[in-house]
Amino acid sequence: MKRQQVILDLDQEVAALLAACAADAKVSEGEIVERAVRSMDLRALVARIRDRSDLDEDAAMQLVGEELRAARAERAA
């Protein structure tokens, strides 16, 4: 996947938290930001599925998981 460099202005406290999370997870700060954004997108997807269906939370999460796996497989191909 093609990557793009992004420059962010963060509150010092948030920047320190980002650095600490990255160090704890032994990944880059960019990876932590990417995970956070993907997590937000996943929650939004769950909300959209719930709004358009009568699935309960467990069924909605199962559907989201299936869609996420499919999207990852598509990206890997």
Image: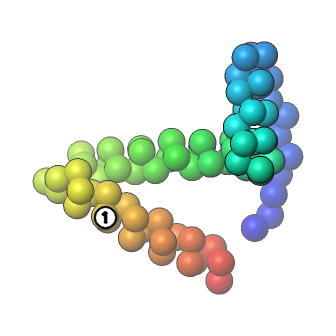
The residue beneath circle 1 is 62
Residue at left offset 48%, top offset 75%:
70
44 relative position to 22: left or right:
left
> Would you place residue 31 above or below residue 15 in this image?
below
Which residue in the rendered view is the most extreme toward the bottom? 77
Q: Is residue 65 visible?
A: yes
| Nearer to us in this view, 5 or 25 | 25
| Screen quadrant of the N terminus | bottom right
Quarter-of-image position of residue 6: top right
36 relative position to 64: left or right:
right
Q: Is residue 53 visible?
A: no
> Would you place residue 69 above or below residue 19 in this image?
below
**Residue 61 percent coordinates (x, y):** 32, 57
| Nearer to us in this view, 23 or 72 | 23
Residue at left offset 31%, top offset 64%:
62
- Amino acid type, label 1: Gln
Circle 1 crowding by C-alpha within 10 Å: few under 14, some 14–19, many from 20? few
Which residue in the rendered view is the most extreme toward the front? 24
Quarter-of-image position of residue 47: top left
**Residue 24 percent coordinates (x, y):** 72, 42
